[in-house]
Image (spheres, rainbow, N blue to C red):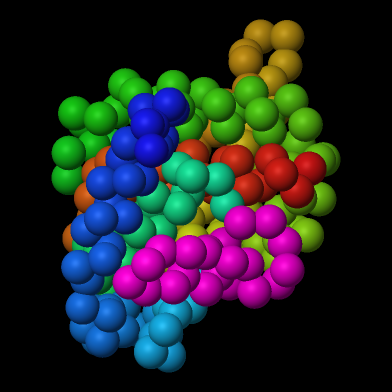
Amino acid sequence: MQLENHKEEVPFSFYQEKFRELSPQAVPERLAGVAWDGAEFTVTLLGRQFAIAHPEYTIRALDGGPVPPLATQTFLLRYLLECRDTSWGGEWKTFREMPWGEMYIQPYTGRVLTRAAFTFGTRTAAYRAAAEKMGAEKVPHGDAGYRFTLVPGYEMQLLVWEGDEEFPPNAQVLYSDNFADGFAPEDRVVAGDILISTVKSYM
């Protein structure tokens, strides 16, 4: 099959091949929040559960809803292949404060922070309603701030400030400090992107 959408389909195909070679029994030892029943992994992403078959990859939503887009499926494959549980020290970090954050900050700012600011900072009431529909926890930061569980053991905060006549809307994303060891920098970028897209889908 010739791949047309190289931006998403080529990396997905690459990790799908690596996934076939994965030893499934080792994954729950590395990721306590993932279950393996001999045929499928069960993974939880932002409160939704998905079953992922192995070795021939298929994904289905256990709530009967839609499966996530291809970029999110690639993130889940990388999660199963490469991520590991690390304990949270109780601190929150910005993307820039984590390893390699300075190197990736320019694309991260555009892809995550600016996008979040102009998606939610102009519609804070809709953002609050969507976050609460997802079961997120309200936090006392920003004009509207919520805490989300990305995958078990890994927490994120999405903080939004409304714009006015003098200042444009603004946003910040905070990560539980274990992201620094548990996820690669590019996956932290994608995590922010997935969070924004998921909240937007509830608006």
Question: Percent position (x, y) of residue 180?
Answer: 23, 55
Magenta stretch in the rendered image: 45-67
Question: Is residue 92 something that shows in the picture?
Answer: no
Image coordinates of residue 94 in percent, x first then y, are 36, 43
Rendered position, 42 above or below 102 = below
Task: Give the residue at x 76% y 59%.
Answer: 132
Q: Residue furthest bottom?
A: 37
Q: Quadrant of the C terminus?
A: top right
Looking at the image, residue 161 sits to the left or right of residue 109; the answer is: right
As for residue 50 lying within the magenta part, the answer is yes
Q: Residue furthest front?
A: 1
**Viewer-proximal residue, 167 or 114?**
114
Query: Could you tell me residue 23's position as x and y percent?
Result: 21, 78
Tell me the residue at 41%/64% (across/down): 57
Horizontally, residue 65 falls left or right of residue 36, namely right
Q: Is residue 148 left or right of residue 24?
A: right
Left or right relative to 80: residue 200: right
Indicate yes or no whether the magenta region holds residue 28.
no
Residue 82 in sight from this viewpoint? yes
Q: Quadrant of the N terminus?
A: top left
